[in-house]
Amino acid sequence: MPFHFELQIIPKIDISKTTLAASLVKFANGSVSIYMSKHIYPELFEATFPEVVSKAGILWGKANNDNQCYCWFPSNLLSDKEIENMISWIEKFRKYQLIGLNPGIKRYFSNELDYCMALDKRTERNEKPDLLLTLYYTEMGKIVHNIYENYSSEEGQVQLNYLIYRLKTAFTDLPIQGIREEIVLSTTPVSERDKRLSQVLTERLAQSLSLSMIIPTMTISKPNLQELTIDEKIRFWNKVYYYDENIRLNEIVRDKVIIVIDDIYNTGVTLWSYAKYLKEKGAKLVIGLVCVKKLTELDNNPIEKSRKRSGV
């Protein structure tokens, strides 16, 4: 029996993280099948390729793999360009990390962040033959790391430009087709004295996309959040947002769709807390677009701090 997905403008990510498992098969008779993970991806595919979906002979049939479903297209209905675009979409979403609430913060939040996507994981596991588990940077993780290490150098600026290009490409893959409200970019709250990488990325991306930018400036000092537990982070951000004078916004956010740009998604507390604040100020939708997501969402316990010292 075929599956039916109720198409929404912003499909809900109801698990902590997921990546696409998919394949496209072209048969000798000219027909085409595309197999993909059942969770959220069919909704995203329909939103991205409405004309292609209308040609399907079977829409989201049950695949042999219980975790997948498939679309089947009769012979020679799809153009080479449509197939090429579908393959490109699959390749990108195999890398993208779709992010929902993780168990560590689920009790604090619900629907504040409508959708969140990272370009890739920050690190990847590599299990060697001797069963020793090591971690290594992904392509995006290495680029972000190198920008931090060599920001002022020519190499650092080249990699920064490439990162902005990748964010711009990912922006076009967000499920915001058909949204009529004004779309603006924002960064997570920044200090009056410091200019973080996320702010640079947001400014450059806003300029490239010809979009307005909301800058949330903190008027109080910010601790080193990497040294805080999740509960401590929650208490800090609740204190920040409780008093209006702690945050200055350069624009009104009411009824706007806000895309929040950040460099690294760690536990998610900063992004989800900011999304909650924006919703309370009247934002219509809040979407996160981040460069890399940490492999785990562990609290800052001794094991996690040890990993930080080792650079992962």
Image (cartoon, rainbow, N blue to C red):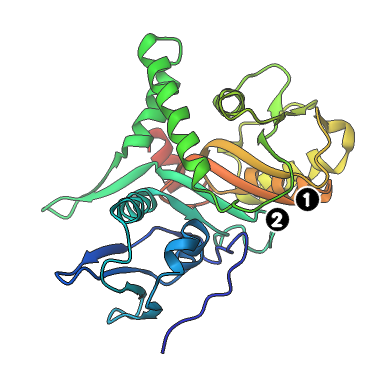
Report helix, strand or loop for mark 2. loop
Residue that extends furthest to the left in the rendered view of this protein? 129
Q: Tell me residue 132's x, y (percent).
A: 19, 51
Report helix, strand or loop for mark 1. helix
Q: Amino acid at mark 1?
A: Lys
Whether the residues at callouts 2 and 1 have beta carbons within 8 Å, the answer is: yes
For residue 209, side relative to residue 218 (left or right): left
Residue at left offset 44%, top offset 67%: 53
In the picture of the structure, the residue carrying the numbered disc 2 is 112
Quadrant where the C terminus is found in the figure: top left
Residue at left offset 88%, top offset 36%: 244
In the picture of the structure, the residue carrying the numbered disc 1 is 279
Quadrant where the N terminus is found in the figure: bottom left
Q: Amino acid at mark 2?
A: Glu
Neighbourhood count class around disc 1 (C-alpha, 10 Å): few under 14, some 14–19, many 20 upward: many
Q: Is residue 309 above or below residue 11?
A: above
Q: Is residue 12 above or below residue 253?
A: below
For residue 94, side relative to residue 103 (left or right): left
Quadrant hosting residue 157: top left
Q: Tell me residue 62's x, y (percent).
A: 36, 82
Choose the circle earlier in sequence order: 2 or 1.
2
Q: Nearer the viewer, residue 309 or 284?
A: 284
For residue 192, side relative to residue 81 (left or right): right
Q: CA distance from mark 2 to mark 1?
A: 7 Å
Residue at left offset 27%, top offset 63%: 23
Q: Tell me residue 42's x, y (percent).
A: 46, 67
